[in-house]
Amino acid sequence: MKILGISAHYHDAAAALLIDGLPVAAVQEERLSRRKNDSAFPIAAIEYCLDEAGLEPDTLDAIIFYERPLLKFDRVLTTLLRAFPHSRRAFAHGMKNMLGEKMWIRGIIRAELGVPKARILFTEHHQAHAAAVFLTAPTRAAAILTADGVGEWATLTTGTGRREPGGGTSILLDREIRFPHSLGMLYSTFTAFLGFEVNEGEYKVMGLAAFGRPTMADQVRKLVSRTADGAFRLELDYFDFHRTVRRSFSDRFVDLFGPPRNRYQPIDLATQDGQRFADCAASVQLVLEEILVDIAAQLRRRSGLPDLCFGGGVALNGVANARILRESGFERVFIPSAPGDAGCALGAALFADRIHFGRPDRDFPDHPFWGPAVDGADLARIAAEDGLEVDQADDDRLIEESADALVAGKIIGWMEGRCEFGPRALGHRSLLAAPHDPAMRDRLNRDIKYREEFRPFAPVVPVEQADRFFELPPGGSRLAHFMSGVFPVRPEWRERLAAITMLTARRAFRRSTRYSRRASMPSFKPMAGARTFRSCSTRRSILPGSRSSAAPRKAIRPSGGAGSTC
Ligand SMILES: [Fe+2]
């Protein structure tokens, strides 16, 4: 059976193809279009998936969309009407938005792919998030937690999943928190307040938090109160996202936290305002962690299961994920390579296969490499066309020379095999640099990635040596499998790993960074015996506002002619 999953029209559009229960291809549209967070109907991603399998669209047995448009319309309409007349401007915008492409997705799929109506299915958004994590994780029974900004109505769900070997699959989400009460919206509101782009800059808030103190945690707690049943609710007077499109926080919010940051002003931590922004970030980060740990601990007690599958955009917060692992009582925490909305394309396809059609359980390959592959011959031809020197080396020489180049302070653009599915650079599209020199961090941030100084890099080490460098809780290496956890660097390594260690400004406390294990990491062992490497995505290696590419030509010429190795 051939099933295509699609996510689109909010952010991070993507497509994923399953054949007989196993993935064949999955890619985010932005990787092909190079438009940041491309939300358009993912026609290029769909074409890639079908080409990879040699299929025509009319041979697909089912196409499944990652949310239910009518339920979403119901939420948008109800929310706007509740806030009327305050929402009158947002009303026109919201209706135009929903009554455009979003409502008529079945017709768009039919028009674009020429498939009969009966083959087009829909899943609820958080079911897709839950399937994307539970049905890709190496576990047969797990508690499930999903959290994001909002889907149709749900913003957070909890439940359980069970897989019978060769048999049936169940995902039961039995509790949910509904819009506008949303941890994702709480964090996004601070993202906007701190001058970053919502749905894109949340990881900058997490990075900035390491440079602040949670001095305003009590103010944040005023925005989000806990309820007797262990859930939470937002105090809506502090927010505007539910009634206007102009801004997400209200004047009362500004009374609590001061004026918002102008997005064009750099954050200078030496100034009072710069430190206030870092403290705001640290405060919302702390409160988010506390609530997530508490909800996860309740779920642990209620489910009695040792494994947690955590999905949704909030699961991209590696600091919170590490605290959940340490403090909630779960022994293992699984987070997929694409926990956000792009991953819902794969989740929806898995949901259709295992649950809608009731097909037998299959183990999902435990790696993220489902995107377009790089072809060495193509790469050599393109480089030669550009007048770059081409050298072909066997693995031993490649690794030896790469290690020497890293030690000499060079930055290497590394591209191999199929592109990662999800936002992390997990070794197939990465920039590699030596981790010992803090100047390297500044150079990467300033010259290569054009980004703020507080954003972290991820060290790469063989998984069996992870304990040597990092203070890992039990289960930590699994959480780091797809770069989903942030852990402290061991004290004896902090100086030697200065470029990947974040220093909080006032506590003189070195914050951890993430590390990842590549599926093919053993090939780096000769290099990594005495050294670790840090890796960052080529996604933003290029120019601000552009995206990494799965294609060799775009990766080799990221900024209009510069080679990727420097
Ligand atoms: Fe989502």
Image (cartoon, rainbow, N blue to C red):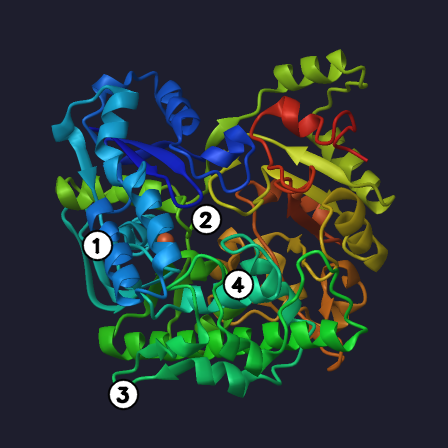
Residue 161: x and y in percent read 23, 59
Query: Which residue is the site of mark 2?
Result: 337
In this image, 409 relative to 275: left or right? Answer: right
Q: Quadrant of residue 50?
A: top left
Q: Measure how far apart labels 3 and 1 are at the Cα level.
A: 28 Å
**Precedes in sequence: disc 3 or disc 2:** 3
Under mark 2, the amino acid is Ser
Disc 2 residue: CB within 8 Å of ligand 1? no
Q: Measure how far apart labels 4 and 3 are at the Cα level.
A: 28 Å
Query: Which residue is the site of mark 3?
Result: 228
**Precedes in sequence: disc 4 or disc 3:** 3
Answer few, some or many: residues within 10 Å of disc 3's Cα (few below 14, many 20 plus, some between 14 and 19): few
- Secondary structure at numbered mark 4: helix
Query: Which residue is the site of mark 1?
Result: 74
- Secondary structure at numbered mark 2: loop
Q: Relative to 50, does residue 5 appear above or below in the rendering?
A: below
